[in-house]
């Protein structure tokens, strides 16, 4: 794909992701959910910035992060040096996670935990479990047993953890596997898997994202035992109100340099690491190097626009909508509206279409991409509905997560290993940027209006959305297994001893 085609493709994907939600929100605001004009205008401007930012960011990430992952992964495999592979994997895992936009949005919205502390905790969790992923590939450790042991440890710690940290911990696992992290980790895994020459090497390159989602959950659960709460004003989910259009414009203009500094500081570790690796080992030629540096520049610009649009205009209206829909006359609409939004969010997620095709190919057409598409859309829609029911009822997140993960882990013993790896990888695919930037503030607004505890009742939405593909993809894998077993072989023709068998036609 040439640069021009990639440019239009990425902006088409970004528009398809943001536009449906923007239209639904605008329709509600013009019909039955009254909001001030400044909020709606700020939201619409934020939507445009989100589309442009996502387009530039994903294009830049494809050109830079994926290529960096491929080059470093290939170089590491040639070294065949296990300590080097593990140490570089840890450093890269930390560096790439710090720059993940979904994580930055989540951290900014979590009250009582300092944003930097949460981001670094999650980043260390990803780094450590990227090391575990490398060991799994190199030593051929079965994915299902590894997941069973790790999630057993997760729920053991969860039983001892402060309830305020539970939902945030599981949400952290969902947002980490975003548009920055996934392409990089997948490229690194494919490179390292090439060390092995056996038939299962390519299959074992799946599952890296799944394991890197467990790391942040464990890291935040451990953090809960040692961290003292920060002041509650650490949360950034503050509704921005503007008296005039000039004031609104100034709000956006003042936010740009702030987020530019944040993004530059977030990207600096991965850029520095790549440049050092380039000088010491990679020694790429001028043209590939310039393309990667241009990609990093686009990533930076896109991320600045993305975060500005989200924090100044987009999330504020999500918060207000959630708040207004809890009024007695509109409360009955909270769950169905959340489910409709969930349907459109998953439909517009580009990575979901890749996942659907992957499953269709794995099942040799027995599970169609269309069937996968609808099953995932229904699952994520249900996840959003369950999240709003939690806001209304205050039911603990564990009543949903424990049965959900239990079903997912049991299914792992009945479906082909590749389906399990792809299922656990795809949890982050479903919880895309719009889940953290709009649906989470939506839940927080509803929870605030209901007088609930944001930490226990609103957070957890991302976790539920991320959990659903674990079950859905594996159920599709089980259907595939049953279909294969149910195929009746054509009976061989029986011939008598005196029958004449013609092997050719005259």
Image (cartoon, rainbow, N blue to C red):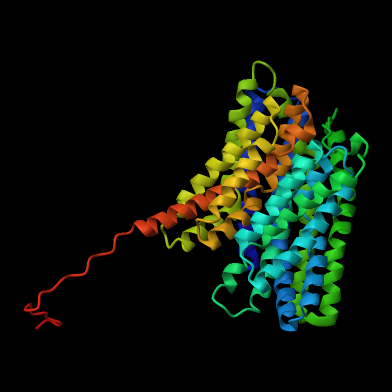
Q: Identify which residue is drawn at 64% across, 29% down.
A: 389
Relative height, residue 348 to residue 416 (above, below): above
Q: Identify which residue is drawn at 80% across, 66% down.
A: 90
Q: Identify which residue is drawn at 78% across, 38% down.
A: 313
Coordinates of residue 252 in the picture (x, y in percent): 84, 42
Residue 320 visible to the viewer: no
Viewer-side residue, 433 vs 49? 433
Coordinates of residue 10 in the picture (x, y in percent): 64, 57
Answer left or right for 414 relative to 183: left
In the image, farthest residue toward the top: 329
Which of the 4 quarters of the picture holds residue 344? Answer: top right
Viewer-side residue, 442 vs 56? 442
Which of the 4 quarters of the picture holds residue 159? Answer: top right
Viewer-side residue, 113 vs 269? 113
Viewport quadrant of the C terminus: bottom left
Which of the 4 quarters of the picture holds residue 270? Answer: bottom right
The number of callouts visible is 0
Q: Identify which residue is drawn at 83% across, 30% down.
A: 241
Answer left or right for 54 relative to 386: right
Coordinates of residue 93 in the picture (x, y in percent): 78, 63
Residue 394 visible to the viewer: yes
Viewer-side residue, 305 vs 346? 346
Viewport quadrant of the N terminus: bottom right
Coordinates of residue 39 in the picture (x, y in percent): 77, 30
Relative height, residue 282 to residue 367 (above, below): below
Answer left or right for 224 relative to 430: right
């Amino acid at each position: 794909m040439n640069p021009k085609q990639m440019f239009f493709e990425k902006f088409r994907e970004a528009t398809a992701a943001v536009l449906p939600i923007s239209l639904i929100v605008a329709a509600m605001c013009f019909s039955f959910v009254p909001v001030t004009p400044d909020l709606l205008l700020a939201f619409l401007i934020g939507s445009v910035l989100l589309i442009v930012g996502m387009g530039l960011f994903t294009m830049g990430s494809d050109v830079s992060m994926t290529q960096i992952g491929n080059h470093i992964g290939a170089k590491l495999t040639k070294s065949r040096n296990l300590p080097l592979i593990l140490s570089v994997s840890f450093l890269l895992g930390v560096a790439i996670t710090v720059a993940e936009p979904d994580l930055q949005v989540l951290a900014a919205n979590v009250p009582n935990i300092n944003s930097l502390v949460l981001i670094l905790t999650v980043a260390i969790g990803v780094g450590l479990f990227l090391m575990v992923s490398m060991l799994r590939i190199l030593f051929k450790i079965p994915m299902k047993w590894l997941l069973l042991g790790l999630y057993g440890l997760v729920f053991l710690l969860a039983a001892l953890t402060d309830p305020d940290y539970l939902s945030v911990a599981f949400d952290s696992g969902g947002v980490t596997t975003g548009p920055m992290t996934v392409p990089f980790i997948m490229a690194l895994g494919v490179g390292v898997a090439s060390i092995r020459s056996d038939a299962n090497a390519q299959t074992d390159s799946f599952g890296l994202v799944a394991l890197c989602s467990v790391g942040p959950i464990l890291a935040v659960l451990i953090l809960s035992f040692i961290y003292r709460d920060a002041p509650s004003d650490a949360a950034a989910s503050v509704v921005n109100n503007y008296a005039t259009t000039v004031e609104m414009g100034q709000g956006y203009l003042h936010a740009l340099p702030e987020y530019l500094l944040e993004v530059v500081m977030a990207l600096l570790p991965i850029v520095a690491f790549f440049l050092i690796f380039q000088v010491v080992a990679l020694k790429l030629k001028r043209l590939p190097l310039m393309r990667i540096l241009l990609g990093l520049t686009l990533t930076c610009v896109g991320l600045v626009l993305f975060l500005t649009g989200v924090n100044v205009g987009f999330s504020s209206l999500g918060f207000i909508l959630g708040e207004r829909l809890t009024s007695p006359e509109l409360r009955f609409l909270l769950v169905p509206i959340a489910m409709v939004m969930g349907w459109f969010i998953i439909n517009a997620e580009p990575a979901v279409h890749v996942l659907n095709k992957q499953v269709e190919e794995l099942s040799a057409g027995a599970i169609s991409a269309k069937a996968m598409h609808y099953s995932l859309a229904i699952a994520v829609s249900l996840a959003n509905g369950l999240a709003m029911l939690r806001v209304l009822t205050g039911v603990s997140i564990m009543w949903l997560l424990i049965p959900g993960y239990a079903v997912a882990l049991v299914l792992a013993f009945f479906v082909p290993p590749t389906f399990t790896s792809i299922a656990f990888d795809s949890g982050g695919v479903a919880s895309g940027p719009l889940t953290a930037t709009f649906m989470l503030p939506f839940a927080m607004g509803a929870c605030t209006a209901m007088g609930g505890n944001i930490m226990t009742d609103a957070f957890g939405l991302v976790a539920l959305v991320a959990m659903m593909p674990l079950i859905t993809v594996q159920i599709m894998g089980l259907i595939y297994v049953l279909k294969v077993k149910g195929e009746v072989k054509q009976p061989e023709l029986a011939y008598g001893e005196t029958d004449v068998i013609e092997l050719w036609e005259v």
